[in-house]
Image (tube, rainbow, N blue to C red):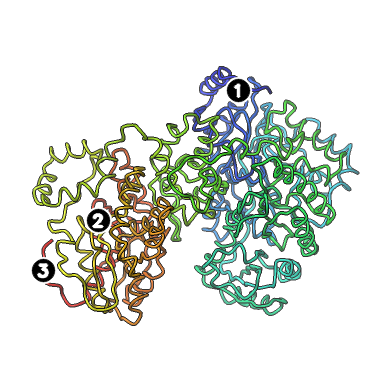
Amino acid sequence: MADRTVADRRELERALRAEVRGEVDFSPGARALTTMDASNYRRVPDGVVAPYDAADVAAALAVCRNHGVPVVPRGAGTSIAGQATGTGVVLDFTRHMRSVVSVDPAARTAVVQPGAVLDRLRGEAGRHGLTFGPDPSTHSRCTLGGMIGNNSCGSHSVAWGTTADNVRELSVVTYGGAELRLGKGWGPPGSRPGAAGSPEGLRELVADHLALLRTGFPGGLPRRISGYALDALLPENGTDLARAFCGSEGTLAVLTEATVRLVDSPPARALALLGYADESAAAEAAAGLLPHRPLTVEGMADDLVPDGEGRGLPRGGAWLFVETGGATAAEARARAEEIVRGADALDGTVVTDPAGQRALWRIREDASGTATRIPDGGAEGSGGGEAWPGWEDCAVPPARLGAYLRDFRALLAQHGLRGTPYGHFGDGCIHVRIDFDLLGEEGVRRFRAFSQDAAGLVVAHGGSLSGEHGDGQARAELLPRMYGGELVALFGRFKDLWDPAGGLNPGMLVRPARLDENLRFAVLPREPVDVVFGYPHDGGDFAAAVRRCVGVAKCRVEGPSSGPEVMCPSYRATGEERHSTRGRARLLHEMLAGEVVTGGWRSPEVHEALDLCLSCKGCRSDCPVDVDMATYKAEFLHHHYAGRRRPAAHYSMGMLPRWLRAAAPFAGPLNAASRVGPLASLAKRLGGIAPEREIPRLATRTFTSWWRRSGTAGPPLVLWPDTFTEHLSPSVGRAAVRVLEAAGLGVSLPPGRVCCGLTYVSTGQLDRARAVMRRTLDVMEPVLDRGAPVVVLEPSCAAALRTDLPELLADDPRARRLAGSVRTFAAALEEHAPDWRPPRLDRPVAGQTHCHQHAVLGDAAERRLRERAGLTGELSGGCCGLAGNFGFERGHYEVSVACAEDRLLPAVRAAAAGTVLLADGFSCRTQLEQLAGRRGRHLAEVLAEGLTAEPADGV
């Protein structure tokens, strides 16, 4: 299958459009989004097809077969071995073929399409007290088709097995066009007329090699995922064609529907946490816990626990997460306590609170991303603190896991590499990200040499090269080390019976590409790109910042979540990959590569994807590797519009501080004019403002004009008069002054005009932002010399001062000093008036934690202050959807509303009468007012109401 010319691709696209009802997209953007999965590999496809149904799959395969074009089935693209990348046509099952078709609680089965997300199936099954047993850490976005293709497992496999253990029947279409129904036995259970249960010649192939199939596979391995599961076709194993198909990585046929087994989900669960000295000690203890029949036995070490997130973990340097279930909470807890008593651990505790369990499990589930950053730099020549898959998920017999880990650590040291193992200790399956240098020739040679030695080590311990994620390109070349040449040759004959033309996912499992080919880093520029931000966590290298995205796709979670997460509001609103954090990172990667996405900073594909980024900064905290798309967007816009005319909104809202200062003396007349329909329409049209939006009213008296004092007695605080408080909501500033003074704190303002530069940053006007910030530092220098804390009421401005300021002015030490002095309103009270008792309000609250507060500042102090004031209830996560200028810009209104409908508006509608609506951000308050007709208030305003009534003092 030779490389295709542009003309060949155009003809292929025309043929597919004529035959397929679903989307056919051969654009540079679509191709760029699917060049990579969550692995080290990159392959460029010709185009993407999103089939509408099984008939579409068959039609697409027929067209590709006629054109000699390979096909790669793809779900969420979270594969870690490269099997979800490929040349030819990618079949994207996440757009249309994503349904849970039916759930049969009596039979304990479900019928699903390949693009169905696992959590959707678990939600449907959960209504009947059932669940699907396998649950990878990507359960919120991985698809059943991908799980079947990789034979995924997850943390509960010690109780419920792998995906292959939970599959009953599969409907597939081969590259040659045969429609098969796979189940147990050679016959066609439930097939349509003319369909066969297996490819012609397969039965004879098995019969001719019974001895090899009975002796060629290692035993005692609950997690043997490598190679084809041909031993499932042995008569003593039930001749299970569906099981043999699992783990075939899209190389045999394309799945169109699956019938899967469901299991009882214990109504109550408890989590036993066991602390050990190190991961080897934890590994050696894991197998001894299996007789207790736990639901999970997961292990990880302390260097995978982010700072500040280890609360609730017992004493130790490594931990086992052992979950138990029961009919009642007491039963589940009793089983967990029995495990703690019986375990030979340094320390142990039992967690029964569901929220506490979720928080602890989140640490474990985020490890696949957290492990990609090794603290304190990497080994010499290893590319610094970056760590990558490549020896990601081998498995050994559980009883040998401790010994294997010791030998594995020694092998790492021998090669001058570092990595932190974690994973499914109860099944002997280990995940690890290693600080390979995949950018230079010597580093790639070391990567290859280590992989070969590691394969030998795993085989010496009786293990499997893959214990969960499949072989893909990462390990398929090494399969002869595990199985020998004769069995690997049989794998090739097995593949050829299904796919004689070799059209399905070529290069995977049989006749594989080398493990050091097609590395995704090879196309990136070797010299640092000229950028404005400092990227301090990536050595000042924009390409390294973009490399942060490893593709685990936590940003692709569907539907509202129950936690505080913000990321990724635009994906939740649109469901499109290009509007996810991962999608945007992929496009930026391809922009730097210049092969598929051309035009560099002028790229229309990247601009279109970033246009719907709300700059909420949610990915900065919610992404396991802290991708910061808001910063990347600002950087891109700066270069994209260099020397060019900008959109009107950049001049109107991007330069908002300047216009508001000029408008302040005319606030009354301007407010009146904004309520005159034709004038308002003209202003919005000229300013690039969405016609659906109302123009906010200007304060007739600014905050600083109200302020007539030089300060008051008490420990001094400097209150930052941000643009929004100054010109649009001075009542917040007045309320904050009253509360701070009531707490015995002295309040003053900066000695001159200040601005954080937020609106310039969000619109990519970085030269202006830097100039504004330098002037601000000049004004603030006396304050910094005094060491006075700076209280910032608007969360987005506080976040800009904390992050954007020092990253844009990395050469000015005053920037770091100012960033370090910034305090939120609640943090200032807690830090400087710890004994002050706020007024007791005893009212429920609803609303939303500001996205920048969540991502940059944290809200622990705000939670404690609300609790002390008797303000009960939780604020929702997510983003309000207005996000500064975003929701006001023309063309963004529908997405802005959809973001608000994700979390904020439902929470407000569900609030009981008398509930206080909290919204510390001006954008959040504006969104509430314009979409819900409700008034949200800053926490300072609510607390001020509890103090002695303030005399009326203007608007």
Lateral position of residue 922 relative to residue 30, left or right: left
The residue type indicated by label 1 comes to Val
- Contact (CB < 8 A) between labels 1 and 3? no
Q: Which mark is residue 63?
A: 1
Which residue does the numbered mark 3 point to in the structure image?
A: 952
Q: Residues within 10 Å of mark 2 (few under 14, many from 20)?
A: many
Residue at the image position 50 percent from the left and 42 percent from the top: 585
Q: Nearer the viewer, mark 2 or mark 1?
A: 2
Q: What element carries label 1?
A: helix
Q: Give the vertical position of 440 relative to 603 (above or below).
A: below
Q: Is residue 102 visible?
A: no
Q: How far apart are the two marked residues, 3 and 2, measured between alpha carbons? A: 21 Å
Q: What element carries label 2?
A: helix
Residue 12: percent from left, percent from top: 57, 21
Q: Residues within 10 Å of mark 3 (few under 14, many from 20)?
A: few
- Contact (CB < 8 A) between labels 3 and 2? no
Q: Earlier in the sequence, mark 1 or mark 3?
A: 1
Residue 109: percent from left, percent from top: 62, 51
Q: Earlier in the sequence, mark 3 or mark 2?
A: 2
> Which quadrant of the rendered structure holds the N terminus?
top right
Residue at the image position 85 percent from the left and 40 percent from the top: 487
- Contact (CB < 8 A) between labels 2 and 1? no
Which residue does the numbered mark 2 point to in the structure image?
A: 724
The residue type indicated by label 3 comes to Ala
Lateral position of residue 851 relative to residue 663, left or right: right
The residue type indicated by label 2 comes to Phe
Q: How crowded is mark 1: few (under 14 residues within 10 Å), some or many (20 or more)?
A: some
Q: How far apart are the two marked residues, 1 and 3, measured between alpha carbons? A: 75 Å
Q: How far apart are the two marked residues, 2 and 1, measured between alpha carbons? A: 58 Å
